[in-house]
Image: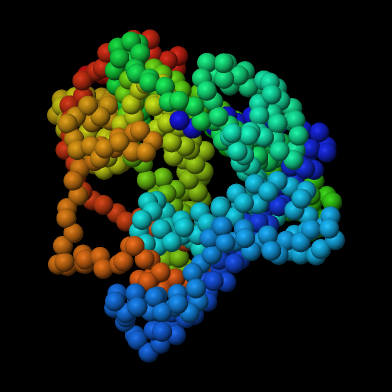
Amino acid sequence: MLRAWKVCLDPTREQQAALARNAGAARWAFNYALGRKVIAHRAFTAARNRALEGVTEPSPVQLKAAAASARAVAGRIPSSFENLAAWRLERGDARLGTDGVSPWWREVSSYTMSSAMRDADAAFKAWLDSIAGRRAGRPVGYPRFKKRGRCRDSFRIHHDVKKPTIRVDDARHVLIPTIGRVRLHSNLRRLIRLQTRDELQVQSVTVSRQGDRWYASILIAHPAPQVSASRRQRAAGTIGVDLGVAVAATLSDGTVIPNPRHGRRAAARLAKAQRAHARTQRGSVNRAKAARRVGRIQAELAERRAGWIHQVTKQLTTGWAVVAVEDLNVAGMTRSARGTIENPGRQVRQKAGLNRAILDIAFGEVRRQLAYKTGWYGSRLVVVDRWLPSSKTCSVCGWAHPELTLADRVFRCGQCGLVLDRDLNAARNIAAAAAAPLTLTGPTPTGSRTLARPKPAATTAGRSQPDTRDKRDPEASYRVPTEPDPATARPGVDVRKTTTHQWRPPRQSNPPAFPRRAAPLVR
């Protein structure tokens, strides 16, 4: 089992300079490896286009043959091992007086350079998997070079676990190669206690800068514990969670988690700092100071939001045996309403405010933390199908409201007369769907399960066509861009209907200390 421990560093001025040098070296190594990949890829694309010259609509067989001939002419795209070997021949050495592309390489850790080159491999592979359809989520664009000031300063250092050079000396100090023994603002007492019980191995350390502070994420490998639900969790049963904006979350037992609105609280101070930064002259000392002030405010905002999400997700995963949430399309929910020049959007400012509020709650981060924390604390995460009409269905009799809008915050059943808060009704339907015998997509890599319904099979009639792409060789069946091109995600609209299920109240025992709504159920 791999687990990361993130701590805040308290380095000296000399150590801060060493951290900045390693971060700059990692950025340079990433750009060096990516540059070699881009040159090889452009040569491959040019050779393939020459092979397909005169062919208007090439078939998959012709594309594959053109790709094979292009590889024979241009060669393959170099991997991290080949880039590392080429760098060792070209790097030079300042101590020996030999010139090269990076004669300063002895000032940083060699693992910083190699890990950055592996990151370039991962970026290029993510783009290839995205265009081949092997990667879920948004389309990944062509890899871009890292620019100082635009990308976060970070680097990763590995070591030989048999001869460790990364060590946790005590609860307040960590030893990092080429940096030295760095003091911590926080402490690692829990990690020290685990070391006395289990055999832990430090795999790597990732150092990053947020605002004006440096953080270290220590990756630890230790035996996976056999965790099961506690007696209190089994007695509590299943809880449905409906995420929202007016309130952060509404639970199926009537518990309400209020929205802290971190972004709104820091909006005025952040806007003032950003206006001051915009008025400064490019390249001046005052502009650098103003940029550090903006970064410090944004880092504080991120820390507050992350701390709140960790508290909420731990309360949920330790309080119940099963936690049920919806599979929300956050990318579609936060899409801009500006439209185009020909068809401009309406209520753009209101939609922008709603998008900020949704992103401030961080629905995706809440689900991600629930996915791995349920495995830590013996509970189970169930993700309900996103097309389940949880807000429009009565949680008692199953009647579907045909004309319910987003402005209606109270659900009124036309069959049994139930009058209930809209979010509470949705949370109860989510809890009922989690216990219903629907199709399970199986365990995911994070240990969660998704409730879904079988999709109709693709046919050759109408608009659906068979997929003739060769997913084993994306370069052979895709016309890849020769220049970096940003990717845009436009998820489609699915109008499938789902059935409803009657909700039964779960057994409750010692719920978390969240405020409750008064008299939520009225007949």
Near-viewer residue (347 or 433): 433
Tell me which corner region of the image, top left, top right, bottom left or bottom right, holds residue 243.
top left
Which x, y percent locates residue 299? 65, 38
Say whether residue 370 is visible: yes
Query: At 67% across and 34% down in the image, what residue appears?
Result: 165
Name, please, the residue furthest toward the front: 162
Camera-nearest residue between 436 and 22: 22
Q: Is residue 210 left or right of residue 507?
A: right
Residue at position x 30%, y 31% in the image: 382
Q: Which residue corresponds to the image point at 71% horizontal and 25% vertical from the top-left?
A: 173
Residue 168 % position (x, y): 66, 26
Q: As drawn, is 20 to the left or to the right of 250?
A: right
The residue sitting at 30% across, 36% down in the picture is 443
Please state the horizontal and vertical placement of residue 415, each as a whole percent of the image: 14, 29
User: Quick one: quadrant of the N terminus?
Assistant: top left
Identify the image quadrant of residue 63. Answer: bottom left
**What colour scheme governs how the chains and residues are painted in the rendered image of this protein?**
rainbow
**Which quarter of the figure is the C terminus placed in?**
top left
Q: Would residue 83 be found to the left or right of residue 236 on screen?
A: right
Image vertical order of residue 227 relative to residue 15, above or below: above
* Left or right, 282 with reference to 111: right
**Residue 44: percent from the left, percent from the top?**
48, 75
Q: Nearer the viewer, residue 421 or 497?
A: 497
Number of marks: 0
Give the vertical position of 256 relative to 101 (above or below).
Answer: above
